[in-house]
Image (spheres, rainbow, N blue to C red):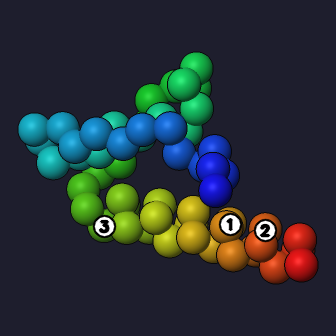
Amino acid sequence: MHHQLLHTAVLAPTGQWLVQHHPDAPVCVLDGATAMVDLAAEIQHRIRTTRNHTR
């Protein structure tokens, strides 16, 4: 199932993550793995919240 919550995430050589939510959206810079895990948790929360509302 495609939720369109994240378009791309690329690990930079500096350890930062470059994240883009949609192809034409601005690129966000996340500082390290902890920020990336926080983003993943936020996406999971959105998926679960949306799934519960559609049942």
Q: Position of residue 40 (x, y in %)?
A: 46, 64
Circle 3 SS class: helix
Q: Residue at x 57, y 70 (%)?
A: 44
Judging from the image, what secondary structure is the residue with disc 1 in? helix
- From the viewer's perspective, is the residue at label 3 or at label 1 nearer? 1
Residue ID for mark 2: 50
C-alpha gap between disc 2 and disc 3 = 24 Å
Residue 17: mark: none
Residue at (45% x, 29% y) in the render: 27
Q: Which residue is mark 3?
A: 34
Amino acid type for the residue under numbered disc 1: Arg
Q: Is residue 45 above or below residue 1?
A: below
The answer to whether marks 2 and 1 mark residues whose Cβ atoms lie closer than 8 Å is: yes
**Which one is nearer the viewer's eye here, 39 or 54?**
54
Is 13 above or below relative to 5?
A: above
Comparing labels 2 and 3, the label whose residue is closer to the camera: 2
As helix, strand or loop, the secondary structure at mark 2 comes to: helix
List x then y, in percent, for residue 43: 57, 63
Q: Residue type at mark 2: give it.
A: Thr
Q: Quadrant of residue 45?
A: bottom right
Quarter the N terminus occupies: bottom right
Q: Residue furthest toward the top?
A: 24
Alpha carbons under labels 2 and 1: distance apart: 6 Å
Residue at which label 1 appears? 46
- From the viewer's perspective, is residue 54 above or below residue 6? below
Q: For mark 2, does the 10 Å Cα neighbourhood hold few (<14), some (14 to 19), or many (20 or more) residues?
A: few
Mark 1 burial class by Cα count in 10 Å: few <14, some 14-19, many 20+: some
- C-alpha gap between disc 3 and disc 1: 19 Å
Lateral position of residue 19 relative to residue 2, left or right: left
Work out whether mark 3 precedes mark 1 in sequence or the reverse, and give the earlier one.
3
